[in-house]
Amino acid sequence: MDSNFLPLFVVIPLLAAFLIPLFAKLWQRSADLIANAAGAVLLGLSAYGVVYLFTDSSVLLYRMGGWASTLGITLVYDHLTALVALAVNVVGLAALLFSVRYLDHYTGRWKFFSLFMLVLAGLNGVTITGDMFNLFVFIEISAVSSYALVAFGTDFDELEAGFKYMVIGEIGGTAILLAIALLYAKASTLNMAMVSQVMAGFGHTPLFWFIVAMFLIGFAVKMAMVPFHAWLPDAHPSAPAPVSALLSGVFIKVLGVYAMCRVMFNVFGLSRANAPAFFNLLLAFGVLSIVAGGLLAYAQKDYKRLLAYSSISQIGYILIGLGIGNYWAIVGALFHVLAHALSKGLLFLTSGSIEHATGTRDLDKLSGLEKKMPVTVWSYLLGSLSLAGVPPFAGFFSKLFIIIGAVTAKMYWLAILAALFSTVTLGYLVKVANKAFFSRKDIEPTPAREAPVTMVLAMLALVVLIAALGIGFKPVLDKLVGPAAQVLLNGLGYARTVLGG
Amino acid sequence: MVALFACMFLLLIGLYAVVTKRNIIRIIIGFSLVEYAVNLFFALVGFKRDALPPIITNVTQPRNFVDPVPQALVLTAIVIGLATTALMLALAMRIYEKYRTFDISEIRRLKG
């Protein structure tokens, strides 16, 4: 099997990002077409990659420009990459389709799609790269474009949120760069596999922990774990809804969770057995995120702000899954990456649909939408059932696996906490439904119409995928999430897979 | 070694400005300091005393060159820094047009 399609993950969105401004001068609407076509091709590529890994489970490698691994950049496509790239491109395409009509009340349509494509290029790049510095470059490509997208509305709130997000996010990015500089000083190579070989003989010295801490700060800011979360509840609600869907759905997970997993597990070879302190730290951050995010979400009155706090809380679930660190817990965490990407993407799209129809996201002003926007409302309800972990939807299995992991590791209190905060999740999501969707006595039903057909399609596609992922969890678990968890548990064995024995 | 610690000191000065200053422009300057400190640090990583520039010449002693990789990486990082600083300043301009102030403590509409 040749791996020549790997660079396309970055080439296609980059090409689209630069073609869009060119063709937009001739025909405004060409931006929609190019962006959606590129999104569809990306989804096709990642589906192809996943199908390939289903049949033949070897790792795909591509050496840029034909240089040897010592000199050039290597692209690596293993199960973990396949899983994350699939999540990115599914949510990416749904958000692009949704944007077509949603952007009707924004100016600068082509600028939006061009920036969106750059974010996708960065996210796909982060997932497939096997090089430390390349990782940083892709992180920055997607981060810088996302700052511009958060401020896209250029009104009071958007500008404030964009600036805050940018300053905090860039401090995180600089921490990652500093960590890479120190790592290079120690290892004299940037290829992740070769760095990990050097790290294997390096030992856990204070310098080692300093590098780990710098990486952790950088990724913690990107994934918005409490207490590094201050920017997220401002930034995600201020962005246009499809961008919120992408940011909350996959951005924080690719730049934060995926990049952290790759560096900590595969490059530094940390595992529960050799670095319990690090994993306990992840648990502490995870518990803090679940509790603080969940409770703050409950107190919100703004539809999107509530969902943003909920993202912080759900990131906490992924963190405790990783922190427990045994097979089932990591499977649960990775399954939650997929399940949360779909559900939170869907929920943010419904928020966009409602804002598009009614012009507000204030839960105190919305009422009785159920009759007028049945598809949006039912999509929301199914998405929130999945997020809260109601069987048979996708979110149920991720939480189930995390709880199984916690019980196997004899951390019963974590299992209880995870189950308890599932009900809190359901609580704040039902609060939205109670206020906005069902008729209330105190205020008149808000005038609204069902969303246009492209928006409805984007939402329905995600609903179908959430249900499919829940009902058909077994093959996904056996062929994709399970092997992806093995990649992480394999730790430094990653070097052998990539460099070929 | 002294130079490396000087870089860290520069980084701390920048971080101090980002955290404590209320004027947006000063925050951006602070951020630039942080970024330059890290870039300088990265460039110094490849430095060797009395070594030659990494250009292929007739010199025969092996390993007498400074490491060229950090220089290449720092160039990339500087370009990224250019993009971020430009975007920050653009945001600062738009913020000034809206709020008529650069004072971050008056730009506080988002809460909760």
Image: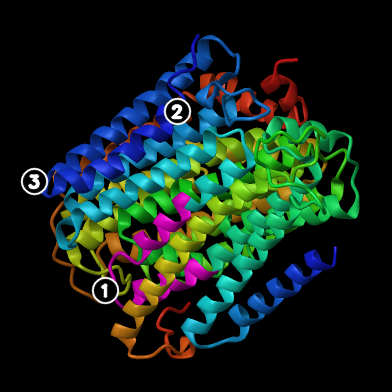
A154 and B50: which is toward the camera:
B50
* Residue at left offset 22%, top offset 59%: A369
Q: Which mark is residue A378?
A: none
Distance of label 3 from label 1 (alpha carbons):
42 Å
Quadrant in which residue B69 is drawn: top right
Residue A375 visible in the snapshot? no
Q: Residues within 10 Å of mark 3 (few under 14, many from 20)?
A: few
Q: Are marks 2 and 1 on the same chain?
A: yes
- Tell me residue A469's x, y (percent): 45, 30
Q: What residue do we see at 69% from left, 26% from top?
A: A486
Which residue is labeled 1 in the image?
A: A365
B8 horizontally vs B97: left or right: right
Q: Earlier in the sequence, mark 2 or mark 1?
A: 2
User: Residue B94: where, in percent of width, then height?
Assistant: 32, 77
Q: Is residue A250 above or below residue A473?
A: below
Which of the two residues, A205 or A158, is positioned nearer the viewer here?
Answer: A205
